[in-house]
Amino acid sequence: MGKDVIIACDFASAEETFKFLDNFTEEKPYVKIGMELYYAEGPAIVKEIKRRGHKIFLDLKLHDIPNTVKKAMSVLRELDVDMTNLHAAGTIAMMEAAREGLTRPDGTRPLLIAVTQLTSTDQERMTKDLLINEPLEKVVMHYAENAKKAGLDGVVCSPLEAETVHVACGGDFLTVTPGVRFADGDMGDQVRVTTPEKAKEIGSDYIVVGRPITQAADPVAAYRRCMAEFVG
Ligand code: C5P
């Protein structure tokens, strides 16, 4: 499975996004388009980034009744992205419906990845707000196993969980991991962080890197450093 660095293009407009992407004249990085950019610019931004030759992870984290998610996924599949995602909390039935909706008539489909518990949800909030009384790590692994049962390709998780997910769900079950920082870099608001090198060692398949590249004085150099440390 090819390891890759995915740049989180957390920009508010197409203009800012293309200004950033125009820095890359030699390589075509894999990019993540999240809710902010997608809701601001719509499907056109996806099509234009695709036209420029980038691979795309469309990070919209769907979560609704199975039939609605299935129909939404069958619309998204026409955008020809490489990876998209949903919330495992929507249940196995919802994840199966999503996979069916995303599958094209010829049997191909983008990679489908599940969010287990958001990293903004800690043990206390999960127990008090969601009334889930199990330890957080157990819930994350259970949701990963549900995603596997539903025929999904992997999960978004912390690089620190990548190894355990691979043990529970198999080596070919993908781990897509944010929370990456250079050893000498600024942590921003991320708490549990890992360097690209360490993420590689633990077995992440894709690292999602935002600010260490997008806010760097030289984004291309930062991207190349990430690729060198993670992919080698
Ligand atoms: O700028 P930074 O490298 O922290 O960006 C990480 C990206 O990964 C952001 O787009 C953020 O929303 C996303 N993400 C995350 N933690 C998760 C899931 C997604 O940081 N658990």
Image (tube, rainbow, N blue to C red):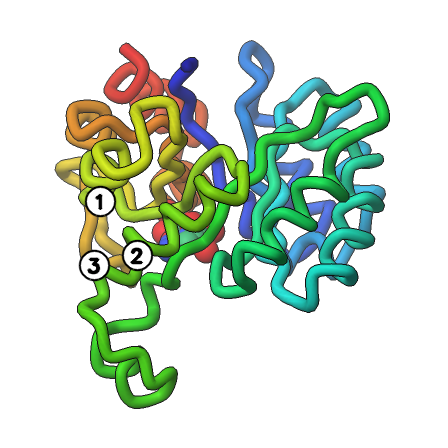
Percent coordinates x, y for residue 101 in the rendering: 76, 43
Q: Circle 2: is it few (<14), some (14-19), or many (20+) Cα within 10 Å? A: many
The span from disc 2 to disc 1 (Cα, nearest Å) is 9 Å
Name which residue type carries label 2: Val
Q: Residue at horizontal 40%, vertical 31%?
A: 174
Locate the C terminus by quadrant.
top left
Q: Residue at x 66, y 41 (%)?
A: 99
The numbered mark at residue 161 is 1
Question: Label 3: which residue?
Answer: 137
Residue corresponding to mark 2: 140
Instruction: Give the quadrant of residue 79.
Output: top right
Q: CA distance from mark 3 to mark 2?
A: 5 Å
The answer to the question of whether label 3 and label 2 lie on touching residues, with beta carbons closer than 8 A, is yes
Residue 11 image offset from top left, x and y in percent: 59, 52
Callout 3 crowding tier (Cα within 10 Å): few <14, some 14–19, many ≥20 = few
Q: Which mark is residue 146?
A: none
Mark 1 element type = helix
Q: Is residue 11 visible?
A: no
